[in-house]
Amino acid sequence: MIDLTAEIITSGTEILLGELVDTNTAYIARKLRDLGINVYFHTTVGDNVARLRAAIEIALSRANLVIITGGLGPTVDDVTREAVAAAVGQPLVFWPELMEQIAARFRRLGRPMPENNRRQAFIPAGATPIPNPVGTAPAFRVAKDGAIIIALPGVPSEMEYLMENAVLPYLRSLGGGGVIVSRVLHTAGIGESQIDALLGELLSGSNPTVSLAAHPGQTDVRITAKAATREEALALIDPVEHEIRRRLAGHVYGADGQRLGAVVSALCRKLGCRLAIVESYTAGLLAQELSESGRELIVHHEIVSVEKTGEPDNTAVQRAQRLQAERGAGAALVSLSPDCSQAAPEELITATIVASLGRKELVDSLRFNGHPALFQQWLLNHSLFLLWRLLADVAPEA
């Protein structure tokens, strides 16, 4: 049984220049996570033999599994074969079998094979070829002082095919690893720094680990555990999740794939109430988020214009109360902010939000000082949060 620690290397100058988005690394990382293989580093290197060799050698100093994508094509800037050979101290060797596989693919396509495709039949001495039936770039794996290097094509469809059909079965055959399981708790109405202070020592655990990721108007708390089985990993996560929910009571609205709008819609159904919505700067996004899982719950929707000075809280409260009475809505959400699309980044922006249910109201003034482009998402999430808090207070068991 081998306890594997991995590093993923992406080769491609086009990625460094921002001309191509690297999706391969994310895909491979998820697959390795599911096998219980820790990934501690991602590296991107341009099409340069010396720099790629150096990156491989650095990776070998801190990982015993290195997976490289890209640089296996037929052109002179495809240098992964040369870089791996140099890193493991072996010459490149021509494989007639690989040459025949490449030539056979061109024959099937009815096209002549360019001479430069012959380069793809060379792999480091001692390497094990990984045939590529969906492309012309053979992959390979090679050992170096107990570590494993796997070189895969950069074309995502080819890489994914070889991962599923060759690499993952091989890694499973090595045993060990177990599984890595994560649960993400979604919070709103509380800042990342506040969460950091409240969770304290929980953020220093080794298994499970707890980490934070801030987004406009909400923060995710990720709990990750490694164990022999998924059930054992979940058993490690559960008590930590319970403690996090206790410390962040009133702010954790869901987990994993749950969206705040869907959680609010579910609460409305549980309470048997329908919604009236008035919004300004969110320009319909509030209604859209809620209608994705509860269109039938919305009995009134209105987009209004607000003057630069905004509307006082009592005006918004009166509007919410009137809507409940006139539209027969059980709950009303009024989110009002002046148009800040031309605001300067240092300008303070204030919005008024009212969530009303019967005679109970939650009123908040969202004060925002940051890039105006982010304010709309902040206002959207904070408005939904206020409505969620109001509904959850009435149905606390939810």
Image: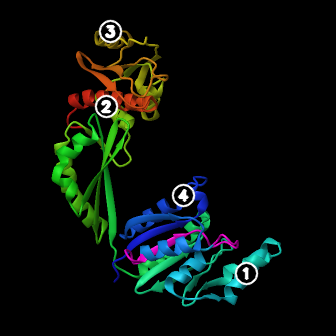
Give the distance between the C-alpha atoms of the residues marked 1 and 2, in whole angstroms.
60 Å
Residue 131's x, y, as percent? 62, 80
Residue 250's x, y, as percent? 21, 36
- Residue on which the image places disc 4: 22
Residue shown at 39%/70% (left/top)? 35
Residues at marks 4 and 1 touching, judged by CB atoms closer than 8 Å: no
Q: Is residue 121 left or right of residue 363?
A: right
Q: Earlier in the sequence, mark 3 or mark 4?
A: 4
Q: Earlier in the sequence, mark 1 or mark 3?
A: 1
Q: Secondary structure at mark 3?
A: helix
Q: In the image, is residue 64 part of the stretch drawn in magenta?
A: yes
Amino acid residing under circle 2? Phe
Is residue 245 visible in the rendered image? The answer is no
Q: Main structural element of the magenta stretch: helix, strand or loop?
A: loop
Mark number, residue 118: 1
Residue 53's x, y, as percent? 52, 75
- Residue on which the image places disc 3: 315
